[in-house]
Amino acid sequence: MAMSLNKVQLIGNLTRDPEMKQIPGGQVVTSFGLATNLSWTDQSGQKQDKAEFHNIVAWRKLAEIIGQYLKKGSKCYIEGRIQTRSWEAEDGSKRYKTEIVADNMIMLDRKGETIATDAAPAMQANHGGMDQGPTPVAPIAPAAAPMAATPAAPAAETPAPAAAPAQEDEVTVDDLPF
């Protein structure tokens, strides 16, 4: 059997306020734009910047959290998968839209703290380096209980501003937005 993988990791800023809707089946869906920036130095030594714009879609509980806590300009980490939808336009032409379906979101611009969320239970992610790929995540435990670490992740860390003290790495139940 052939292996396949569809996984996306983005860190960027919202280009518009999230738009939350309830579809006829009762599920909540939220969509928003996310901009990421690529910087490089060209052959002549000039610094170049290019923005990419991504369409993000989230469902259910994650959609509600994003709709409530993020706004235009918010910085966040999004993890999900690429999905391309197609439909027939009124003029008969076939149209396509590629979007990222979010499975996980971490807010990155709250003064020294990050809040991790997941479409299932709340999770705290450990991101060692971009080249290493994602590290296994551990569920957030109540403040009185010790946090269970996965074997591959002896210390849970979250991305935080350089000025933030190291003891702010742990997220407690009181920090969760739900």
Image (cartoon, rainbow, N blue to C red):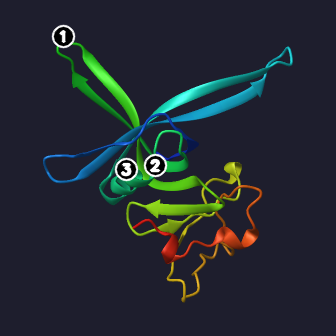
> Taking 33 as reference, is 132 above or below it?
below
Tag 1 or tag 2, which sits nearer the N-term? 2
Residue visible at 82% across and 18% down in the picture: 46
Tag 3 or tag 1, which sits nearer the N-term? 3
Q: Which secondary structure lies at badge 1?
A: loop
Q: Which of the two marks, 2 or 1, is nearer to us in this view?
A: 2
- Residue where numbered disc 3 is placed: 67
Q: Quadrant of residue 92?
A: top left
> Taking 36 as reference, is 90 above or below it?
above
Q: Quadrant of residue 137?
A: bottom right
Q: Amino acid at mark 2?
A: Leu
* Disc 2 residue crowd, few under 14, some 14–19, many 20+, Cα 10 Å: some
Indicate left or right for 30 with 105 as reference. left
Q: Amino acid at mark 3?
A: Gly
- Residue where numbered disc 2 is placed: 70
Q: Which secondary structure lies at badge 3?
A: helix
CA–CA distance in space, label 3 to label 2: 6 Å
Q: Residue 30 or 82: which is nearer the viewer?
A: 30
Which disc, if any, is residue 43? none
**CB within 8 Å, label 3 to label 2:** yes
**CB within 8 Å, label 1 to label 3:** no
Indicate left or right for 19 with 10 as reference. left
* Disc 3 residue crowd, few under 14, some 14–19, many 20+, Cα 10 Å: many
Q: Position of residue 111 (x, y in %)?
A: 64, 58
Residue visible at 18% across and 10% down in the picture: 91
* Disc 1 residue crowd, few under 14, some 14–19, many 20+, Cα 10 Å: few
Indicate left or right for 9 with 158 as reference. left
Q: Position of residue 19 (x, y in %)?
A: 33, 41
CA–CA distance in space, label 1 to label 3: 33 Å
- Residue where numbered disc 1 is placed: 91
